[in-house]
Amino acid sequence: MTVHPPASGSFITLEGGEGAGKSTQIQLLAAALRAMGRDVLVTREPGGSPGAEAIRGLILNGGFGFSSVTEALLFSAARLDHLEKTIRPALARGAIVLCDRFFDSTRAYQGASGGTAPSVLAALETIAVGVTRPNLTFILDLPAEIGLKRAHERRGAGVADRFEGEALSFHEKLRSGFLHIAQNEPQRCVVVDAARSVDVVAADIRSIVFSCLGARTS
Ligand code: Z5A
Protein backbone atom coordinates (compact mmCIF):
# COMPACT_ATOMS: atom_id res chain seq x y z
CA MET A 1 0.00 0.00 0.00
CA THR A 2 1.13 3.60 -0.56
CA VAL A 3 1.20 5.90 2.45
CA HIS A 4 1.64 9.54 1.61
CA PRO A 5 4.31 10.98 3.89
CA PRO A 6 3.10 14.01 5.84
CA ALA A 7 5.34 17.02 6.45
CA SER A 8 5.83 15.92 10.07
CA GLY A 9 4.11 13.27 12.25
CA SER A 10 1.78 10.45 11.24
CA PHE A 11 -1.98 10.56 11.60
CA ILE A 12 -3.70 7.18 12.04
CA THR A 13 -7.43 6.73 12.63
CA LEU A 14 -9.49 3.73 13.76
CA GLU A 15 -13.08 3.47 12.59
CA GLY A 16 -15.97 1.05 12.75
CA GLY A 17 -19.42 0.41 14.17
CA GLU A 18 -20.43 -0.19 17.78
CA GLY A 19 -18.27 -2.62 19.74
CA ALA A 20 -15.80 -3.08 16.88
CA GLY A 21 -12.88 -2.88 19.33
CA LYS A 22 -11.39 0.51 18.41
CA SER A 23 -10.67 1.62 21.98
CA THR A 24 -9.13 -1.76 22.81
CA GLN A 25 -6.94 -1.77 19.70
CA ILE A 26 -5.83 1.85 19.95
CA GLN A 27 -4.41 1.25 23.43
CA LEU A 28 -2.56 -1.89 22.31
CA LEU A 29 -1.12 -0.09 19.28
CA ALA A 30 -0.07 2.91 21.39
CA ALA A 31 1.72 0.61 23.85
CA ALA A 32 3.56 -1.18 21.02
CA LEU A 33 4.67 2.11 19.44
CA ARG A 34 5.74 3.60 22.77
CA ALA A 35 7.77 0.47 23.48
CA MET A 36 9.69 1.36 20.31
CA GLY A 37 10.37 4.81 21.77
CA ARG A 38 7.86 6.67 19.56
CA ASP A 39 6.05 9.83 20.69
CA VAL A 40 2.36 8.79 20.56
CA LEU A 41 -0.77 10.83 21.19
CA VAL A 42 -3.99 8.87 21.72
CA THR A 43 -7.13 10.89 21.21
CA ARG A 44 -10.77 10.43 20.28
CA GLU A 45 -13.79 11.92 18.57
CA PRO A 46 -16.08 13.44 19.41
CA GLY A 47 -13.74 15.05 21.92
CA GLY A 48 -9.99 15.34 22.32
CA SER A 49 -9.96 19.02 23.39
CA PRO A 50 -11.92 20.74 26.18
CA GLY A 51 -14.29 22.45 23.71
CA ALA A 52 -14.83 19.30 21.68
CA GLU A 53 -15.47 17.27 24.86
CA ALA A 54 -18.18 19.81 25.77
CA ILE A 55 -19.77 19.35 22.33
CA ARG A 56 -19.53 15.55 22.84
CA GLY A 57 -21.70 15.84 25.95
CA LEU A 58 -24.22 17.94 24.04
CA ILE A 59 -24.57 15.41 21.21
CA LEU A 60 -24.35 12.11 23.08
CA ASN A 61 -26.02 12.96 26.37
CA GLY A 62 -27.98 16.14 25.73
CA GLY A 63 -31.19 14.40 24.69
CA PHE A 64 -31.97 17.23 22.24
CA GLY A 65 -33.03 14.95 19.37
CA PHE A 66 -30.80 16.75 16.84
CA SER A 67 -31.37 15.96 13.15
CA SER A 68 -28.56 14.21 11.26
CA VAL A 69 -27.51 17.48 9.58
CA THR A 70 -27.37 19.28 12.94
CA GLU A 71 -25.29 16.42 14.33
CA ALA A 72 -22.95 16.63 11.33
CA LEU A 73 -22.47 20.36 12.00
CA LEU A 74 -21.77 19.73 15.69
CA PHE A 75 -19.36 16.84 15.06
CA SER A 76 -17.56 19.05 12.51
CA ALA A 77 -17.31 21.97 14.94
CA ALA A 78 -15.87 19.61 17.55
CA ARG A 79 -13.44 18.25 14.93
CA LEU A 80 -12.16 21.70 13.98
CA ASP A 81 -11.43 22.53 17.63
CA HIS A 82 -9.82 19.11 18.15
CA LEU A 83 -7.58 19.63 15.11
CA GLU A 84 -6.58 23.15 16.12
CA LYS A 85 -5.92 22.45 19.79
CA THR A 86 -4.70 18.86 19.86
CA ILE A 87 -4.02 17.06 16.58
CA ARG A 88 -2.10 19.68 14.55
CA PRO A 89 0.22 20.66 17.43
CA ALA A 90 1.05 16.97 18.01
CA LEU A 91 1.71 16.34 14.31
CA ALA A 92 3.85 19.48 14.17
CA ARG A 93 6.15 18.12 16.89
CA GLY A 94 6.46 14.85 14.95
CA ALA A 95 4.18 12.63 17.07
CA ILE A 96 2.17 9.68 15.85
CA VAL A 97 -1.46 10.64 16.44
CA LEU A 98 -3.85 7.71 17.01
CA CYS A 99 -7.44 8.89 16.83
CA ASP A 100 -10.49 6.81 17.83
CA ARG A 101 -12.96 7.89 15.07
CA PHE A 102 -12.59 10.86 12.73
CA PHE A 103 -14.39 12.14 9.62
CA ASP A 104 -15.28 8.66 8.34
CA SER A 105 -17.62 8.34 11.33
CA THR A 106 -19.50 11.46 10.16
CA ARG A 107 -19.65 10.03 6.64
CA ALA A 108 -20.99 6.70 7.95
CA TYR A 109 -23.25 7.73 10.89
CA GLN A 110 -24.65 11.04 9.65
CA GLY A 111 -24.24 10.19 5.94
CA ALA A 112 -24.75 6.52 5.08
CA SER A 113 -27.04 5.78 8.05
CA GLY A 114 -28.39 9.24 8.85
CA GLY A 115 -29.12 10.42 5.29
CA THR A 116 -27.14 13.69 5.27
CA ALA A 117 -26.21 14.50 1.65
CA PRO A 118 -22.61 13.74 0.58
CA SER A 119 -22.29 17.32 -0.76
CA VAL A 120 -23.08 18.73 2.71
CA LEU A 121 -20.55 16.38 4.33
CA ALA A 122 -17.90 17.27 1.74
CA ALA A 123 -18.41 20.98 2.41
CA LEU A 124 -18.10 20.41 6.17
CA GLU A 125 -14.89 18.41 5.66
CA THR A 126 -13.41 21.24 3.62
CA ILE A 127 -14.15 23.70 6.42
CA ALA A 128 -13.34 21.54 9.44
CA VAL A 129 -10.55 19.25 8.22
CA GLY A 130 -8.86 21.09 5.38
CA VAL A 131 -5.62 19.35 4.44
CA THR A 132 -5.09 17.50 7.74
CA ARG A 133 -6.22 14.09 6.51
CA PRO A 134 -5.27 10.73 8.06
CA ASN A 135 -2.33 8.94 6.45
CA LEU A 136 -3.80 5.57 7.39
CA THR A 137 -7.27 4.47 8.52
CA PHE A 138 -8.24 1.08 9.91
CA ILE A 139 -11.86 0.12 9.34
CA LEU A 140 -12.63 -2.50 11.99
CA ASP A 141 -15.32 -4.55 10.31
CA LEU A 142 -17.69 -7.04 11.90
CA PRO A 143 -21.37 -8.03 11.62
CA ALA A 144 -23.59 -5.48 13.36
CA GLU A 145 -25.15 -8.11 15.64
CA ILE A 146 -21.76 -9.10 17.06
CA GLY A 147 -20.71 -5.49 17.68
CA LEU A 148 -24.01 -4.64 19.37
CA LYS A 149 -23.75 -7.77 21.54
CA ARG A 150 -20.26 -6.71 22.66
CA ALA A 151 -21.43 -3.15 23.38
CA HIS A 152 -24.45 -4.51 25.27
CA GLU A 153 -22.28 -6.83 27.39
CA ARG A 154 -19.86 -4.00 28.16
CA ARG A 155 -22.71 -1.70 29.19
CA GLY A 156 -24.29 -4.24 31.56
CA ALA A 157 -27.33 -2.72 33.25
CA GLY A 158 -26.48 0.84 32.04
CA VAL A 159 -28.58 2.84 29.56
CA ALA A 160 -27.97 2.44 25.81
CA ASP A 161 -26.32 5.54 24.31
CA ARG A 162 -27.65 7.72 21.48
CA PHE A 163 -26.51 5.37 18.69
CA GLU A 164 -26.51 1.95 20.35
CA GLY A 165 -30.29 2.29 20.72
CA GLU A 166 -30.80 2.62 16.93
CA ALA A 167 -32.40 -0.25 14.96
CA LEU A 168 -30.28 -3.08 13.54
CA SER A 169 -30.90 -1.68 10.01
CA PHE A 170 -29.12 1.57 11.06
CA HIS A 171 -26.07 -0.43 12.16
CA GLU A 172 -26.10 -2.54 8.98
CA LYS A 173 -26.13 0.63 6.84
CA LEU A 174 -23.28 1.89 8.97
CA ARG A 175 -21.23 -1.20 8.21
CA SER A 176 -21.88 -0.84 4.46
CA GLY A 177 -21.04 2.86 4.73
CA PHE A 178 -17.62 2.15 6.24
CA LEU A 179 -16.90 -0.58 3.67
CA HIS A 180 -17.88 1.79 0.88
CA ILE A 181 -15.42 4.41 2.19
CA ALA A 182 -12.65 1.79 2.25
CA GLN A 183 -13.48 0.72 -1.29
CA ASN A 184 -13.31 4.32 -2.53
CA GLU A 185 -10.06 5.17 -0.74
CA PRO A 186 -7.88 2.04 -0.79
CA GLN A 187 -4.71 4.15 -0.61
CA ARG A 188 -5.75 5.33 2.90
CA CYS A 189 -8.04 2.64 4.30
CA VAL A 190 -7.38 -0.93 5.41
CA VAL A 191 -10.33 -3.16 6.34
CA VAL A 192 -9.56 -5.44 9.28
CA ASP A 193 -11.74 -8.41 10.23
CA ALA A 194 -12.63 -7.38 13.78
CA ALA A 195 -14.65 -10.51 14.58
CA ARG A 196 -11.41 -12.33 15.43
CA SER A 197 -9.69 -12.38 18.83
CA VAL A 198 -8.22 -9.18 20.31
CA ASP A 199 -4.65 -10.50 19.93
CA VAL A 200 -5.02 -11.55 16.30
CA VAL A 201 -6.57 -8.20 15.32
CA ALA A 202 -3.84 -6.34 17.24
CA ALA A 203 -1.08 -8.28 15.46
CA ASP A 204 -2.56 -7.40 12.05
CA ILE A 205 -2.83 -3.71 12.89
CA ARG A 206 0.67 -3.60 14.36
CA SER A 207 2.27 -5.21 11.37
CA ILE A 208 0.58 -2.81 8.92
CA VAL A 209 1.53 0.23 11.00
CA PHE A 210 5.12 -0.92 11.43
CA SER A 211 5.48 -1.58 7.73
CA CYS A 212 4.01 1.83 6.85
CA LEU A 213 6.28 3.63 9.30
CA GLY A 214 9.22 1.62 8.00
CA ALA A 215 8.31 2.62 4.46
CA ARG A 216 8.26 6.25 5.50
CA THR A 217 11.75 6.15 6.90
CA SER A 218 13.26 4.29 3.96
N1 Z5A B 1 -20.17 9.58 16.09
C1 Z5A B 1 -20.92 10.07 15.02
O1 Z5A B 1 -22.10 9.75 14.89
N2 Z5A B 1 -20.33 10.90 14.13
C2 Z5A B 1 -19.02 11.29 14.25
O2 Z5A B 1 -18.53 12.06 13.42
C3 Z5A B 1 -18.27 10.76 15.36
C4 Z5A B 1 -18.87 9.92 16.25
C5 Z5A B 1 -16.83 11.16 15.51
C6 Z5A B 1 -19.20 8.02 20.09
O3 Z5A B 1 -19.32 6.99 20.98
C7 Z5A B 1 -20.43 7.95 19.22
O4 Z5A B 1 -20.46 9.10 18.37
C8 Z5A B 1 -20.39 6.76 18.33
C9 Z5A B 1 -20.43 7.29 16.91
C10 Z5A B 1 -20.82 8.69 17.05
N3 Z5A B 1 -21.50 5.94 18.46
N4 Z5A B 1 -21.89 5.37 19.43
N5 Z5A B 1 -22.31 4.83 20.30
P1 Z5A B 1 -18.18 6.55 21.98
O5 Z5A B 1 -16.93 7.31 21.75
O6 Z5A B 1 -18.78 6.60 23.33
O7 Z5A B 1 -17.99 5.05 21.69
P2 Z5A B 1 -17.71 4.26 20.40
O8 Z5A B 1 -16.68 4.90 19.56
O9 Z5A B 1 -19.02 3.99 19.75
O10 Z5A B 1 -17.13 2.95 21.01
P3 Z5A B 1 -17.73 1.54 20.75
O11 Z5A B 1 -17.98 1.37 19.28
O12 Z5A B 1 -18.90 1.28 21.61
O13 Z5A B 1 -16.63 0.60 21.15
P4 Z5A B 1 -15.20 0.28 20.52
O14 Z5A B 1 -14.23 1.31 20.98
O15 Z5A B 1 -15.23 0.02 19.08
O16 Z5A B 1 -14.92 -1.09 21.19
P5 Z5A B 1 -14.18 -1.43 22.59
O17 Z5A B 1 -14.65 -0.49 23.67
O18 Z5A B 1 -12.76 -1.58 22.37
O19 Z5A B 1 -14.78 -2.88 22.83
C11 Z5A B 1 -16.16 -3.08 23.11
C12 Z5A B 1 -16.31 -4.35 23.98
O20 Z5A B 1 -15.94 -5.48 23.20
C13 Z5A B 1 -15.39 -4.34 25.21
O21 Z5A B 1 -16.03 -5.00 26.25
C14 Z5A B 1 -14.17 -5.15 24.73
O22 Z5A B 1 -13.53 -5.80 25.78
C15 Z5A B 1 -14.82 -6.14 23.78
N6 Z5A B 1 -13.94 -6.51 22.66
C16 Z5A B 1 -13.10 -5.69 21.96
N7 Z5A B 1 -12.48 -6.37 20.99
C17 Z5A B 1 -12.93 -7.64 21.07
C18 Z5A B 1 -12.66 -8.84 20.32
N8 Z5A B 1 -11.79 -8.84 19.28
N9 Z5A B 1 -13.30 -9.97 20.65
C19 Z5A B 1 -14.20 -9.97 21.68
N10 Z5A B 1 -14.49 -8.88 22.44
C20 Z5A B 1 -13.87 -7.74 22.13
Image (cartoon, helix red, strand yellow):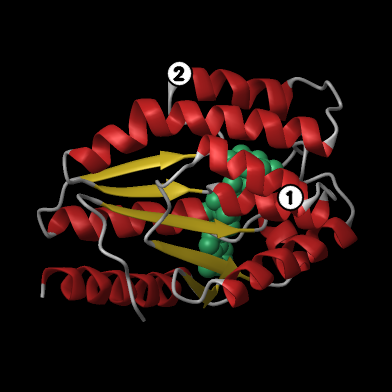
Q: Position of residue 31 (x, y in %)?
A: 25, 54
Q: Amino acid at mark 2?
A: Pro
Decide which of 10, 132 is in the foreground and name it: 132
Q: Tell me, yes or no, if residue 33 can be seen here.
A: yes
In this image, 207 relative to 23: left or right?
Answer: left
Q: Residue at label 2?
A: 50
- Element marked by disc 2: helix
CB of mark 1 within 8 Å of CB of mark 2? no
Give the vertical position of 53 relative to 217 (above or below): above
Q: Position of residue 83 (x, y in %)?
A: 41, 34
Q: Tell me, yes or no, if residue 155 can be seen here.
A: no
Image quarter where the N terminus lies is bottom left
Image quarter where the C terminus lies is bottom left
Residue shown at the point (44%, 55%) measured from the top left? 13
Residue shown at the point (30%, 69%) measured from the top left? 209
- Element marked by disc 1: helix
